Amino acid sequence: MLRDEPTLTPLAGCTDLYVALNFGTLKDTRFLDLWRLDRLRKIELRGGALSIGALATFTDLIRSTLVRKRLPMLAAAARDVGGVQIQNRGTIGGNVANASPAGDTLPVLAAADAVVVLQQAGGIRRVPFDGFYTGYRQTVRRPGELIVGIEIPPVRGRQFFRKVGTRAAQAISKIVMAGILGPATGSGRTARIALGSVAPTVVRVPRTEAALASGASIEAVQRTLMEEIAPIDDLRSTAEYRRRVAANLLARFVCGASRG
Ligand SMILES: Cc1cc2nc3c(=O)[nH]c(=O)nc-3n(C[C@H](O)[C@H](O)[C@H](O)COP(=O)(O)OP(=O)(O)OC[C@H]3O[C@@H](n4cnc5c(N)ncnc54)[C@H](O)[C@@H]3O)c2cc1C
């Protein structure tokens, strides 16, 4: 159907689409309902990678023993999404496709070096997460392509996820951070950190990661992070608040990890 009519709008849990419909901001009026494609709901190990079907809901992620074991920060992110009703309907594919800089699973997938699996009638392609977003709510997904899954290679090290919003449920993040801190070795340690709600897209912070890996003091790493991100003032928060909270989350992540 997408080959014949590439402008059809895919519809999964509809939790973002319905809001857009209500606000009258949705241009397209013809939809392709994916909800019954149960094959796109599987969560399994494939070739060593954790493979999550695009239609896996947040509830599926929370309940999955594989996700809890391999990528507990994704289960933590799913638990913080909306409320139970949204968790039952909202999908990981919808979260990724919707491309909001505040999407809660996005920093997790960015920090974990996930790969987005896209399929169209002609075949499949895999896009590394750091090349998927091209700007505010823009992705490399072509008309006629579906996100069919997300693949996450094995992750080594301590994982961290924290969302800061106005309240514990039904709140869009003011700032959201995910991180992975590798075990300390003679040559240092690897660090992967991603943040949402601080830029037009989810971002990795390579300078902060390098500072952490080099063994710099936490104060120095916090300063690097505050310089590296460029949040804005908007109706949910201020740039200054976001910078400070990001630095605090980083300290919590790193200091917690060094105790573990
Ligand atoms: C009350 C409320 C609270 C919310 N709270 C949060 C929150 O705390 N954190 C958060 O991150 N989000 C939140 N959201 C947003 C939303 O629930 C998530 O982004 C969710 O993951 C969207 O998934 P969906 O399946 O409902 O997507 P849909 O609404 O069905 O689709 C969203 C977009 O993705 C496209 N799409 C969907 N699936 C695919 C696919 N497989 N391939 C290609 N394109 C696709 C659609 O065409 C559409 O453009 C909230 C929404 C509401 C209404």
Image (tube, rainbow, N blue to C red):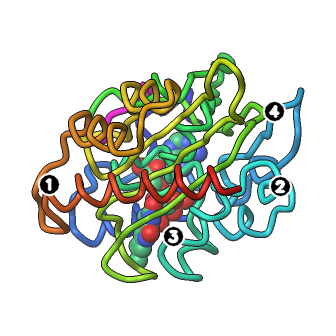
**In this view, 45 is above or below 245:** above
Closer to the chain start, of discs 4 and 3, is: 4
Distance of label 4 from label 3 (alpha carbons): 24 Å
Label 4 CB, ligand 1: below 8 Å?
no
Q: Is residue 139 magenta?
A: yes
Residue 91 percent across, percent down from the top left: 59, 58
Residue 75 percent across, percent down from the top left: 67, 62
Relative side of 161 to 166, left or right: right
- Label number found at residue 239: 1
Q: Residues within 10 Å of mark 2 (few under 14, many from 20)?
A: few
* Bounds of the magenta segment: 137-142
Relative side of 26 to 84, left or right: left
Residue type for callout 4: Ala
Label 2 CB, ligand 1: below 8 Å?
no
Residue 42 percent across, percent down from the top left: 82, 50
Residue type for callout 2: Lys
Q: Is residue 10 visible?
A: no
Q: Pick whichever, 29 or 159, lies toward us.
A: 159
Residue type for callout 3: Val
List the residue tagged with mark 3: 81
Kindly report which numbered mark, 3 or 2, lies closer to the viewer in this rendering.
2
List the residue tagged with mark 4: 49
Closer to the chain start, of discs 3 and 2, is: 2
Do tag 1 and tag 4 residues touch (Cβ < 8 Å)? Answer: no
Do tag 4 and tag 3 residues touch (Cβ < 8 Å)? Answer: no
Distance of label 4 from label 2 (alpha carbons): 13 Å
Closer to the chain start, of discs 3 and 1, is: 3
Relative side of 180 to 253, left or right: right
